[in-house]
Image (cartoon, helix red, strand yellow):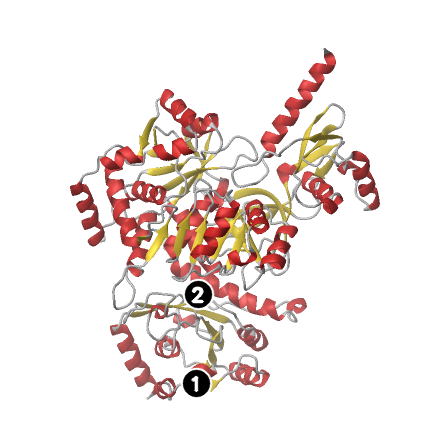
Amino acid sequence: MNKFIKFCLRTLFTLFKCRCKIRFDLKNLPQKGVYVSNHVSYLDPLFLYAFLPGNPVFALNGHLHRRHWIRNLMKYADTVLFNPIEPTDLKELIAKVDSGRLVVIFAEGRITENGGLMKIYEAPGLLADKSKAPIIPVWIDGPQYGYFSKTKGKLPHRPLPKVRITVGEPRPFKLKDELRRQRDHISNEVYMILREMQFEINYNPKLSLFAQLMKTGKVHAKEGFTLKRPKVIEDINRKPHSYKDLLVKSFVLGKALKKKTVRYEHVGLMLPNTLAAVCSFFGLSAYERIPVMLNFSVGPKNIMSMCQTAEVNKVITSLTFIRNAKLESVVELLKAKGIEVIYLEAFAKKIGIFAKIAGFLRYKVKRVPHKNGGNKKAVILFTSGSEGAPKAVVLSHANILSNIKQLATLETLNTTDLVFNALPMFHSFGLTVGTLFPLFEGSRLFLYPSPLHYRVIAELVYELGATIMFGTDTFFRGYGKIAHPYDFHNIRFLYGGAEAVKLDTRNMWMERIGIRMMEAYGSTECSPVVTGNNSVFNRFGSIGKLLPAIEYRIEPVPGIEKGGELWVKGPNVMLGYYMPENPGVLVPPEGGWYKTGDVVEIDEIGFVYIRDRIKRFAKIGGEMVSLTAVFDMVVNAYQWMGSDFGYGVVAIPHESKGEQIVLVTTNTQVKQEVLHEYIKNNGLSELYLPRIIMYRDSIPTLATGKADNITLKKEVLEELAKQELSKAS
């Protein structure tokens, strides 16, 4: 009877678009093991009862076991009532596995309420470890969009969602003796296994960015029985748009731009965070034109250098933006060099009614001009320039989509979320994380053109009821100081990146506003995110754990005893560079490995800690001295004066010692004698003492708020040269 019931259920579910994929040969199915599954609906035990191989025991939590219809449909299955925090229940399951049985257990202990992974209990890990049985991960996808889930109001529901069940290969689960007492580690290990499954299931390496937008738009096109289209994107013009509006405008603009460009042409985009910038980006991408995101904050000379490096012959911008940002000199230089400047205001007036109708029809038939993306070029961005002349970073469709799906395993977005993004789209953090991530995951998005308007941004976050913000330490420190604590009352989580999140910034947000800041880490070359903390695992001082599908190596660095340089490899690592000295010639990363230039240590449970940056070392008398450590020493020595002062530390050539350290600061109270006394009292090396101290009104920074050490060093050298010249005369 058991086999007959399973056959009937399997046939019924198959008719209603349910599919199960087993990723290993059933001949290799272990005699005993632990099926560990996510939990998205009340139907999950029935799906697994119908499709899982073997005759497993089902450990049903109380919320499932109390429902008579589930018990009646599974009365021929071997089920037990299970409480994940009850030791006797766990011992009973261990005994069953030891007797040679397979056991099914839902790692979360309850049905998810946001569509993604929630809290993971340590019971599955303990069960596998104590019984010396392998874990067989199972991922259920689809029922979260159905009426038997708990995501009403957070995800769009429909009567018969497609259901995919994926059974991964059995993997051994053995805890180290020194980690057995760490309950959070046991649950985190299971969590990491499941989130790897989540990434593998949801990541399609063949899709293009525009195809992914169409796919998300189809899922979130309408809501409820009224078939009302939810508004998902808005800018400072305060005219919210739905996915339909966004897609139609992208079709229309893309088709018009197609006539002025050729396939795979690099087209510059010089626009602030607006709906027009998003439509231009997707319009170019839809017809296989490559958007080149130009950083308009770096001056005419550098913008021209970017265009030459990426071989840009046309730049799309806005006349209103050029006037407001006072970028007329940039436009004049571009035109003088033979680059065509296209103003969107004038260009849009040339688009007729028939072109708009054609764009609407393309949307209605869901026609994707180029569905396959894969390793084709998708966008060209530029490095921040903190290590030298900006290089063009070429990212593929697969790079960006993989990073978005990696991010989705870190934090789950839903339709109740509103992401407030003020990070510029010419920065990878602002493009991938701040703009594409919410659009592709179905949350709402508000675009603001500048992260520097601290008071205005705080008021807008309050007015809009934003739930998520991404930014840098510099910007968050500004918001936290100026804003009223209640402005951020609706914020669900904050992520800081692009520069280290300082202790005083983190403490200010926690103590004054009551919000815990998360820290993530990455680089433009990695699309950009590599590691991140989240609400499940978060350690202060750490940049979190590596995202799924990312391999790493720690390479030793001469002169550095602890840690080494972090090398990473994965689907999010760039196609390669276009170098300023060799425009248009792609230089791929050697062997697929990207050398981050950061010195890191990784602890026994996977948390990554940045110790320094290779470029931020000085070699003084043969000794390696960390400029970051010198910076920290100065900040700590004058911490009593507050955090309103700026400090910059650079190394310049020295005739006899190789290099010497120069401190540039806005704090005129900084003196060598005080620093020397602090070094002596705290047992630090005498090499940490800056030999030259310069006082300035401000420290140069990049658009992200990060210190611009290249410009600072150049200014220091120029100032010293002037001093030498005046002495000689």
Left or right: 338 as drawn, with respect to 61: left
Q: If the image is split into quadrants, where does the C terminus sit?
A: top right
In this rendering, the answer to whether 138 lies above or below 277 is below
Give the mark nearer the N terminus: 2 vs 1. Answer: 1
**In the depicted view, which residue is nearer to us: 256 or 204?**
256
User: Real-space Cα distance between discs 2 and 1?
Assistant: 23 Å
Q: Report crowding for label 2: few under 14, some 14 to 19, many 20 or more residues within 10 A (C-alpha).
A: many
In the structure shown, which secondary structural element does the residue marked by tag 2 occupy?
loop
Which of the labelled discs sits on residue 65, or is there none? 1
Residue 53 visible here: no
Location of residue 690 (image quadrant): top right
Which of the labelled discs sits on residue 116, or is there none? 2
Location of residue 725 (image quadrant): top right
Residue 171 visible here: yes
Which residue is at 46% across, 58% downward? 467
Q: If the image is split into quadrants, where does the N terminus sit?
A: bottom left
In this rendering, the answer to whether 383 lies above or below 79 is above
In the structure shown, which secondary structural element does the residue marked by tag 1 occupy?
helix
Residue 160 location, x and y as percent?
27, 71
Location of residue 506 (image quadrant): bottom right
- Mark 2: amino acid: Gly
- Mark 1: amino acid: His
In this rendering, the answer to whether 340 lies above or below 148 is above
